[in-house]
């Protein structure tokens, strides 16, 4: 799983400019790190959960692998390191937290609008939970702060939960979390729930998928923009996670939201023993998937898989379209600002008083319109681009559970094969007159009969769960898109109404030119 | 029939219209109509750009007009370059706003304005070439044009240094400085506005693509797909509306302010050319004066004559120039005013329409989500 890496701000301790370095592909890059990569990934879902051996059959088993490995030299390092990069993360000391430097982004692109205005996660009061109660929970991620200096620095976010649900002890509480904490949470949830068919929302990406395509002159990939994008992504991630009725009640989720101290998520970094193990399992899974030829008895699953394949292609195309839109809108903004400046200079140079004033007013109107363009670009991005991106990533999780079902089926089949062998072996031993071995063979048969039954139960269970999950996913999708459309339309109406105001104010100025 | 005093033109300047344009290969042919003064009779002729050029050369090359060089000639747009549509961007590079709009409509407006300006100019409209141009059924054809002393390309490089020649008259020095400044500013502003309009057109294309992609997402596989399809369709409609909005806004821009800025830029350049011509006459005069002073006695009288002629020419040009400057500065403000008002009114109207459309969409979507 890709993670955040904060490089040292060379020699500038305490600077407020926070830069994020683009790193190359690391081994754990999820298949959606670059949407430009081929749409069909060989891997169902590259999650840290891949370290689950196929022998685990319960949610809790995986936790062993996440504990501190005494041999792990980098136990304290919590940042994912790109093995290609020349820089390595040093060992962080376990002392009191270093001084916290509040980040005031030096470039606030659009101070007037609250980007949070476009957050899709704010409208959840109407959400119905599975038990019919209204889902009353709101999580906000805010106040990004740079913690520490140099190589040890990272961003800390404030996670505030407001809820009236009884499973939580308080109505409102907040904690501080860093990016790797989110990754750690996801890792735990994936390892507990994916293999039994639950669609676990993926954690936000490390690399900035869309922004790399945005070639803008004026607004470089500034740190403020990046932080805001990440903040928003983290918020959406949490909201999506808690909207899942099963995940909401998971103790790891509750701990993440409630407890002030969280054990460092060590499994997310590459060089640990757990990391290597994940690598190995990931590769093994890829091989396994290629050789599983499932005998599908239920057409629903085949159809759904095909639909999701199609949807994936469509969403990526849409995402690319929106990226282009965002890019060009930013260009329009730049051009408008440039034109406004020109008009202002004209206004200053014209002799004729009324004409001069009108031109200056024109310049002001154009500046305001530029502001509108920027706000609209924000809307384009935060409403559509991120939505589409989220869904492309979600689809990999969906595909993942389908693959898990295949694995479950495969395990069941393997157990049946094994049972058959044991029966054959027992049959042979019937005539060999070796009572000890015969008894052992009979015991083994019993054992494998049990496994076959378990396998069948698991398969039926995962199939049932997936059907329910897919239904939930599809409802969510419709709901999410509806919310976004309405917010977008509101922004469109707002823009036009502002324009009306500006033009109505300008008209008398133009008419006043004698 | 009524006659305009001294004018050979008995057409009403403001009635001149370019009513149609047809393209044949690389050539555009313009249909020009105008109305006779004091009657409802109209005239219609067909002209190509070559014909316009012929007219312009004739106007610029008249020999019997005193102080001709002091006239600010209404600027003729540059030659249009039709070709195939994919060369449109090349045309835009060369002609700017005049190359935009459907079917050369902005270009036609610019030509129309040119003719109206010439016909309204009290000196220029006396030229027979104008009457010929506007009324003669046969086009002037490929008549051999006298080489205009001051066509657009007249400022040869070696003459550029004369541009900075210090003036003897404070009024004119002042005018030259201001004009140089304004010309550059208007040119820059026009170019930047063009970039704004092109960006809006690009956005329209993007919205179109997005809308089409959404439309292609529709499927009827099962109830869930149907629900999602409804949303995609709705969004597709919305972006179609956004696209139309961009197209109309861009069109408003180029047909009003774009054209206006382009015109102003070219007119400022025309004034610049006039001022430069006068400066050249000044240089000639000063040079003639110096020659006279340095001349040997036997040559002095001849030199005096030359100097006197140069002085007379210079004074004539200067006095015409003063009038022209007054005239220009009076009319340009009115022209800019009407373009600015037109621009504002169009954009206001479009914004109101779009606001209503988006509000309708919003209402429809709110109802949809209550399902």
Image (tube, coloured by chain):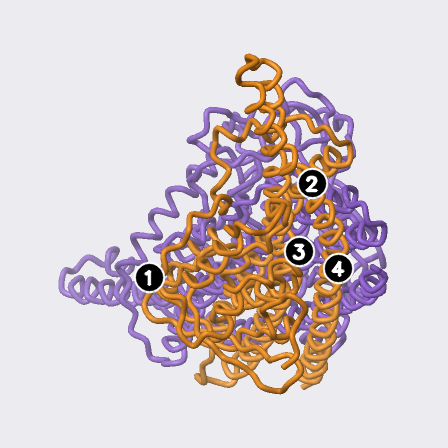
Chain appearing in orange on the rendered image: B
Q: Earlier in the sequence, mark 3 or mark 1?
A: 3
Q: Are marks 2 and 1 on the same chain?
A: no
- Report helix, strand or loop for mark 1: helix
Query: As displayed, is residue A216 above or below residue A366?
Result: above
Left or right, B144 with respect to A93, comes to: left
The subunit carrying tag 1 is A
Q: If the image is split into quadrants, where does the N terminus of chain B sit?
A: bottom right
Closer to the camera, B80 or B360? Answer: B80
Can you see residue A318?
A: yes
Name the residue tied to disc 3.
A378
Residue A117 - label: 4
Query: As displayed, is residue A69 above or below residue B24?
Result: above
Q: Which colour is chain A painted? A: purple
Give the crowd class for mark 4: few <14, some 14-19, many >=20 residues within 10 Å.
few
The subunit carrying tag 2 is B
Name the residue tied to disc 2.
B318
């Amino acid at each position: 799983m890709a993670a955040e890496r904060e490089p040292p701000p060379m020699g500038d301790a305490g600077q407020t400019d926070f830069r994020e370095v683009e790193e190359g592909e690391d081994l754990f890059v999820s298949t959606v790190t670059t949407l430009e990569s081929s749409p069909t990934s060989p891997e169902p879902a590259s999650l840290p959960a891949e370290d689950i051996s196929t022998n685990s059959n319960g949610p809790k088993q995986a936790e062993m692998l996440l504990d501190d490995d005494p041999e792990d030299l980098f136990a304290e390092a919590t940042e994912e390191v790109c093995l290609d990069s020349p820089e390595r993360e040093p060992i962080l000391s376990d002392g009191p937290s270093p001084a916290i430097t509040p980040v005031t982004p030096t470039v606030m692109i659009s101070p007037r609008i609250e980007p949070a205005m476009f957050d899709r996660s704010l409208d959840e009061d109407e959400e119905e939970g599975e038990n019919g109660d209204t889902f009353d929970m709101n999580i906000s991620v805010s106040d990004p702060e740079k913690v520490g200096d140099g190589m040890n620095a990272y961003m800390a976010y404030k996670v505030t939960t407001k809820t009236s649900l009884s499973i939580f002890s308080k109505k409102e509480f907040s904690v501080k979390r860093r990016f790797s904490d989110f990754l750690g949470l996801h890792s735990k949830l994936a390892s507990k729930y994916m293999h039994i068919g639950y669609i676990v929302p993926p954690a936000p990406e490390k690399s900035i998928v869309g922004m790399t395509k945005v070639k803008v002159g004026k607004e470089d990939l500034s740190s403020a923009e990046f932080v805001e994008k990440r903040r928003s992504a983290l918020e959406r991630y949490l909201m999506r996670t808690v909207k899942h009725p099963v995940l909401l009640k998971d103790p790891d989720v509750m701990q993440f939201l409630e407890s002030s101290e969280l054990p460092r998520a060590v499994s997310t970094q590459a060089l640990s023993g757990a990391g290597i193990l994940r690598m190995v399992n990931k590769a093994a899974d890829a091989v396994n998937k290629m050789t599983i030829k499932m005998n599908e008895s239920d057409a629903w699953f085949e159809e759904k898989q095909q639909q999701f394949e199609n949807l994936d292609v469509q969403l990526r195309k849409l995402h690319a379209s929106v990226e282009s839109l965002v890019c060009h809108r930013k260009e329009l903004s730049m051009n408008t600002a440039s034109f406004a400046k020109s008009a202002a200079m004209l206004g200053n140079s014209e002799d004729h008083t009324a004409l001069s004033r009108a031109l200056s007013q024109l310049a002001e109107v154009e500046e305001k319109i530029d502001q509108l363009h920027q706000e609209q670009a924000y809307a384009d991005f935060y409403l559509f681009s991120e939505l589409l991106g989220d869904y492309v990533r979600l689809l990999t999780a969906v595909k993942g559970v389908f693959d898990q079902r295949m694995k479950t089926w495969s395990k069941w089949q393997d157990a049946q094969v094994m049972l058959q062998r044991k029966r054959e072996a027992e049959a042979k031993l019937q005539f060999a007159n070796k009572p000890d071995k015969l008894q052992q063979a009979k015991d083994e048969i019993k054992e494998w009969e049990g496994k076959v039954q378990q396998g069948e139960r698991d398969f039926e269970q995962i199939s049932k769960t997936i059907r329910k999950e897919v239904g939930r996913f599809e409802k969510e999708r419709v709901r999410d898109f509806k919310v976004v459309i309405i917010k977008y339309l509101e922004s469109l109406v707002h823009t036009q109404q502002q324009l009306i105001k500006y033009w109505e104010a300008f008209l008398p100025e133009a008419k006043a030119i004698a | 029939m009524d006659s305009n005093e001294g004018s050979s033109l008995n057409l009403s300047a403001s009635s001149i219209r370019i009513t149609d344009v047809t393209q044949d290969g690389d050539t555009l042919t313009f249909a020009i109509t105008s109305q006779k003064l004091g009657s409802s009779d109209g005239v219609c002729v067909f002209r190509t750009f070559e014909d316009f050029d012929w007219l312009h050369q004739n106007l610029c090359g008249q020999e019997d007009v005193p102080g001709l060089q002091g006239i600010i000639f209404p600027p003729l747009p540059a030659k249009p370059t039709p070709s195939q549509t994919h060369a449109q961007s090349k045309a835009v590079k060369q002609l700017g706003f005049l190359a935009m709009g459907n079917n050369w409509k902005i270009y036609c407006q610019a030509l129309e304005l040119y003719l109206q300006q010439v016909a309204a100019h009290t000196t220029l409209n006396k030229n027979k070439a104008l009457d010929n141009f506007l009324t003669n059924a046969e086009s002037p054809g490929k008549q051999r044009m006298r080489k205009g002393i001051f066509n657009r390309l007249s400022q040869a490089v070696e003459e550029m240094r004369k541009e900075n020649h210090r003036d003897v008259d404070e009024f004119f020095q002042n005018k030259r400085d201001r004009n140089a400044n304004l010309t550059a500013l208007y040119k820059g502003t026009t170019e930047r506005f063009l970039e704004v309009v092109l960006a809006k057109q690009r956005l329209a294309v993007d919205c179109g693509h997005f809308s089409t992609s959404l439309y292609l997402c529709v499927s009827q596989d099962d109830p869930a797909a149907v629900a999602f399809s409804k949303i995609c369709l709705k969004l597709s409609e919305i972006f179609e509306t956004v696209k139309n909005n961009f197209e109309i806004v861009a069109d408003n821009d180029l047909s009003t302010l774009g054209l206006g800025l382009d015109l102003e830029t070219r007119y400022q350049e025309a004034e610049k050319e006039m001022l430069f011509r006068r400066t050249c006459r000044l240089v000639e005069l000063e040079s003639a004066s110096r020659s006279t002073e340095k001349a040997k006695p036997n040559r002095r009288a001849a030199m005096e004559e030359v100097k006197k002629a140069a002085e007379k020419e210079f004074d004539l040009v200067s006095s015409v120039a003063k009038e022209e400057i007054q005239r220009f500065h009076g009319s340009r403000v009115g022209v800019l005013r009407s373009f600015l008002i037109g621009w504002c009114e169009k954009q206001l109207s479009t914004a109101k329409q779009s606001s209503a459309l988006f509000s309708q969409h919003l209402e429809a979507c709110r109802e949809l989500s209550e399902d």
